[in-house]
Each structure stands twice: as structure tokens, then as C-alpha cells.
Image (cartoon, helix red, strand yellow):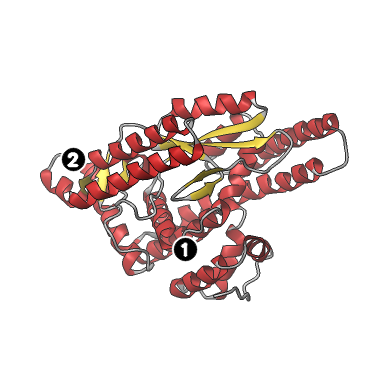
Amino acid sequence: MINLFVKFIRLCLTAIISTLLFGCSSITYYSQAVTGQLEILQNREPIKTLVASGQTNALLDEQLQYALRLRTFASDSLGLPDNNSYRYYADLGREYVVWNVFATPALSLENRQWCFLVAGCLNYRGYFSYEGARQLAIELEHEGYDVFVGGVRAYSTLGWFDDPLLNTMMNGDRAALAEVIFHELAHQQLFVQNDTEFNEAFAEAVAQTGVRRWLHQHGSTDELLAYEARKRQEAEFVSLVMRYRASLAAVYVSNTTVQVKQREKERLLREMTEEYREQRVHWTDTTRYDEWFARGVNNAKVSAIATYRQYLPGFEAVMQAVNASLPEFYRRVSELSRCDVDKRKRILLDQVTDFTCPA
């Protein structure tokens, strides 16, 4: 309890200092951030205690015990931090824990960034309520930005707190639960300030390797086949979006008028949607992608996909080069993180696996 109190005081002081540095407009934002984090800390209970209490139903009992096995596997077999994160549980009574706001100019794919003392600069701003996120989105839309508000099922405090397993993380199948736990723990393993794309793709590479390893050792053949099918479908979706992202980028840097760029943007986004409709007939589960397209597509949505997936092939190439040895993978990625940002990007985009960076 004392340790938790000290950490919470640190969080409050960080919020206060950030407000002094970035101005009075930040007071409301940091207030909701502290309140939202406190809600999670107050609601969490040790999973073992909760299961032993008999207060949970049989389904939740099974999910929680499965999560504990995943948590042990994460440290024992994947080399991820061994701490109390995801050994607690909290039910927030809502579908998402936070809502992230992404914004880009109308004729650019450059994400607007927000900077924080602990995490550095990020490609999004997170809110613990949809209403708060939507209010910022409206303000940015009035300023002419393309905006996307996306619900998030989990996030990492990077070791500041023992992050609990949340009800928001348990809406998918068991492979999805494994993936989100491994992903969030990977952020504790390595986090590079001011490089959201690097951090998210690294965590995803670790998560996917971890899930495959878990399913090979502890899952069924059907679970593994279903997971691989879902990953192939996801890769096709990302490939589609990234192809059109490249076309949009070429339009935005061209020497044409604003009017022509706007027309080309609309045409490309319309064509991407139409190509998706043709492609989806071959997919088994299109729910999440149907929703993504149904709400309209803009630069911010396209850039959000790039934030999480742009450098994943580069990390996968490194993983393959070290024969999926996670200790060696972590060592190589740690070295990569010491490169300047431009060199890091070139290495990952070109899928270079033989690189050196300063110690």
C-alpha cells in the first residue's frame, strides 16, 4: 500500500509539473488522466485472491486462471519483465479503457504529436472517457484536421504501476488475450521516447512471436490455425491501407493545386474502400474492418494504422535473422534503438538485419 501511495504521488507531481510546463489548458487533461488511473488502481484485486473468494462466475474464473498462466509464460519463456503487472484484475464496466485521438492535416499524413514527461511525444492523445476524446476531436476538426477517435482495450504505464488485467482485454478469444498481455509487457521491456511507430511495431512483433510459441506449446491445432488465419487477414488489410497511404503521400508532396490534391485524396480513399469491398468476400470475419470503413476513411485513420504496423515487417526480419531467439532479438533491437531516428527508420523500412548503432 505504501509503494502504491508513493507511486500515485509521483503521478500527481508529474501531472502538476506538466501543467506548469505546458500551460493552464493542460489542467483538465491531466486531471482526467490522474482520475482515470486512480480508478484502475482502486478497482484492481489480486487475481488469486479474487478467484479464491468465489465471487466470480465460472467463465471469468477460467479466463483469469488462463491469464495467470500466460503471465508466467511471458516471463519464463519470453523473457518479459517479471513483476506484478497482469497479476491483478479490474472490471471498469465499459468496453474500452481509453480512447485515443489521432489527428493529421487535411493534406498530409504527418501525425500531430502530444508530448508528456514520462512517455515523451506520442502520435495520439488518450482520454479515459469517450466524451473527453470526442471534445478534442471536435476542436481539431474545427481547426481543419482529419481526426480519428479509436477505443483502446489496454495500455502500459511502463512500469510506473503494476498494470492490471482489465475486462476490456478479455473480449476476444484466448489467443487475443495472450497477444494483448505480451504486447503490453513488451512496452515494459523496451520503450523509446518520441518514437511511437518503433514502440508499437516492436511490441507487436514480440506479441505475435509469443502467441505462436504459446499456442505451439499449450494450445490446440485449431487455435493455432485460427490465429494464423486472422493474422493473414490482418496483413492483407494493412497491406491495402499502406498501398493507398503511399499513393496519398505522393499526391500531398506533388506540385499540384490544393483543389487537385483534395480531389485526388477523395478519389484514392473511395477506391480503397471499393477495393476492400471486393477483397472482404474472401475473408472469414470482417466485423472489425467493416466498422473501420463504415465510419468513413481519412488521413488520420490511415496514419493510425501506420503508427502500429509501418515498421512491423522490419522487426519481423530481425526476428527471423536471429531464428526467433528472443534474448538475441531484444539485444539487437536495443542496439537499434540507439541509432538516430532517421537511421532507425531506414533500417526498418528496408528490412536490414545487419546493422550497427553507437553504444
Image-based side of 149 in relation to 59, left or right: right
> Residue 246 at x, y = what percent?
74, 48
> Residue 290 at x, y = what percent?
57, 34
Image-based side of 319 in relation to 242, left or right: left
- Judge whether 124 appears above or below 83 on screen: above
- Judge whether 323 appears above or below 180 on screen: below
- The single residue placed furthest to the left in the displayed view is 53
Q: Determine the residue positioned at 17% across, 49% down.
A: 1
Q: Determine the residue positioned at 71% across, 45% down.
A: 245
> Residue 89 at x, y = what percent?
26, 45
Image-based side of 183 in relation to 121, left or right: left
Tell me, yes or no, if residue 95 can be seen here: no
Q: Tell me which corner region of the image, top left, top right, bottom left or bottom right, holds residue 294.
A: top right
Q: Amino acid at mark 2?
A: Thr
In the rendered image, the quadrant that contains the C terminus is bottom right
Residue under numbered circle 1: 209
Residue under numbered circle 2: 56
